[in-house]
Amino acid sequence: MIVDKIKKRETNNVKHINPVDIPADKWIKCDGCKEIVYKEAVQENYNVCPNCGYHFRISSTKRIAQIIDEGTFEEFDLKIDTVNPLQMEEYLKKLTGLREKTGLDEAVKCGTGTINGEKVVICVMDGNFLMGSMGTVVGEKITYSIEKAIELKLPLIIFSVSGGARMQEGIMSLMQMAKTSSAIAKLDDAGLLFISVLTDPTYGGVTASFASLR
């Protein structure tokens, strides 16, 4: 039949075009200019949008790689675990999930390293872990780092990114404000340099304690 011949001819004329294989993880949308930018270009520009200058949020691992000389960072190995004073079962499950997802044990990485050959103690908070909230472990890690800076007579640098005190730990998290502030006062008495860098976002109990001291 003529109709069948027409259908066959139309089918034969169809050109099958293979879609271009562009990996989805090569591009990122800028929250500033809303443009789709090449991820590698952003990384080479220190996580700043090359179009509009918007600063992307970055992990503690990337921050340390940007600031500390390659191969010199040594993280403090503190054998402490998160408390659960309010006995919230979902809280511990959430912590376990975040540790598997992020590879972090808590919302801050602390240790020593060098910057242009000069040794420092550095703490870098991470917003990917419960929005960088400060619980007992975070407070203890930062306090330990401050005391270590005093012991070693080294400058201290803290990069803050936090939603504030961790509500799942109640009054225990609020106590970290006083503990860290007291430790910073001792660092000041020792005449040592403290540089506090507030990144986006830094709120609540962290802002109201060590992050705003100098």
Image (tube, rainbow, N blue to C red):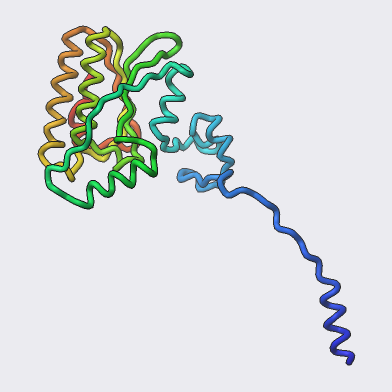
**Residue sitting at the far bottom:** 1
Residue 22 in the image: state x and y as whole percent.
65, 49
Eyeballing the image, is 22 above or below 119? below
- Looking at the image, residue 25 sits to the left or right of residue 205; the answer is right
- Looking at the image, residue 176 sits to the left or right of residue 56; the answer is left
Q: Quadrant of residue 129?
A: top left
Report the label total: 0
Residue 155 in the image: state x and y as whole percent.
30, 12
Residue in the picture at 49% in, 44% down? 30
Residue 149 in the image: state x and y as whole percent.
26, 13
Residue in the picture at 61% in, 48% down? 23
Q: Quadrant of residue 85?
A: top left
Q: On the rendered image, what quadrant is the C terminus found in?
A: top left
Q: Quadrant of residue 159?
A: top left
Q: On the rendered image, what quadrant is the N terminus found in?
A: bottom right
Eyeballing the image, is 102 above or below 212? below
Residue in the picture at 19% in, 51% down? 89
Residue 49 in the image: state x and y as whole percent.
51, 37
Instruction: Choose between 70 and 43: the one closer to the eye.
Output: 70
Eyeballing the image, is 1 above or below 49? below
Instruction: Choose between 25 and 56: the one closer to the eye.
Output: 25
- Looking at the image, residue 52 sits to the left or right of residue 72; the answer is right
- Looking at the image, residue 129 sits to the left or right of residue 188; the answer is right
